[in-house]
Amino acid sequence: MAYVLTAELHDEATGDSAFARNQAYPAEVRDRMPAGAFALATSDWDFNHADHRCPHDAWLESCELSEVPERTVDERRIELTVRLFGAYHDGNLTLRYRDVSRYRTDLRPSSQDAAKGHRDWRYDEPRATVDGRVEHEIEWWGRERTATWLIEAADVEALWVAGAPKRSRHQRAVYPAFGAAKVRPGG
């Protein structure tokens, strides 16, 4: 059940009831939600835009998909690691999905957002599947929606590393504000 993704928010008179339902959801499915997904869904920072760990407005730095060998040569499991450059440009949030069983990425930027990457992480929802896995849906936005991701895995782990990441000479030349605090309207 999606609560705070774009379609659901626009069905509401205000987004407040959608966010309240989203906050109540993890307790309803606690018995079948993986521990890492539950920790993410109930964290005090995931939807707190004033918290520097919050993924809202973060930029994608990398997405690594790996096949990890298991007991035999033909047994493999998929891992997915997503690294975000924090919205305040003062750290990185890494999400590690283990034992990925399904993923879908759909990149469809409008002409205004073309050639600008995924743009900003807007909202995400970690949900429990009926068989005790996590299904994590993510929306990326620029002027409009640019992409959606859906990842199903055994679990997800979130790791925040504070401190301005080192940037290449090219990145510093193209984005001279790297390392400077990002100022958000109203926050």
Image (cartoon, rainbow, N blue to C red):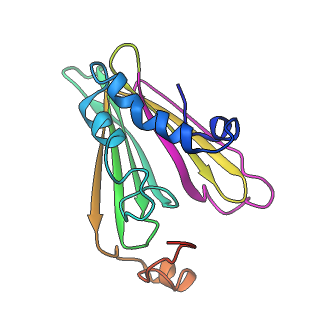
Q: Where is residue 124 in the image (x, y as percent from the top left)?
A: 49, 43
Task: Report the side of 150 relative to 23 (left or right).
Answer: right
- The part of the chain drawn in magenta is 100-128
Q: Which of 38 and 151 is in front in this view?
A: 38
Q: Position of residue 171 (x, y in %)?
A: 49, 78
Q: Nearer the viewer, residue 129 or 96?
A: 129
Please report the residue visible at 34 percent of the width from the left and 73 percent of the height from the top.
165
Q: Nearer the viewer, residue 61 or 40?
A: 40
Please report the residue visible at 44 percent of the width from the left and 71 percent of the height from the top.
88
Residue 70 lies in quadrant: top left
Q: Position of residue 145 (x, y in %)?
A: 68, 49
Residue 27 higher or lower than 84, as above or below:
above
Please report the residue visible at 36 percent of the width from the left and 30 percent of the height from the top.
26
Residue 8 lies in quadrant: top right
Please report the residue visible at 32 percent of the width from the left and 41 percent of the height from the top.
42
Task: Report the side of 31 relative to 89 (left or right).
Answer: left
Task: Report the side of 169 relative to 91 (left or right).
Answer: right
Residue found at the far left of this picture: 71
Residue found at the far right of this picture: 111
Residue 146 higher or lower than 78, as above or below:
below
Label count reads 0
Residue 110 belongs to the span the image colors magenta:
yes
Residue 107 higher or lower than 183, as above or below:
above
Residue 67 belongs to the span the image colors magenta:
no
Residue 166 higher or lower than 123, as above or below:
below
Q: Where is residue 85 in the image (x, y as percent from the top left)?
A: 43, 64
Q: Which of 99 and 17 is in front in this view?
A: 17
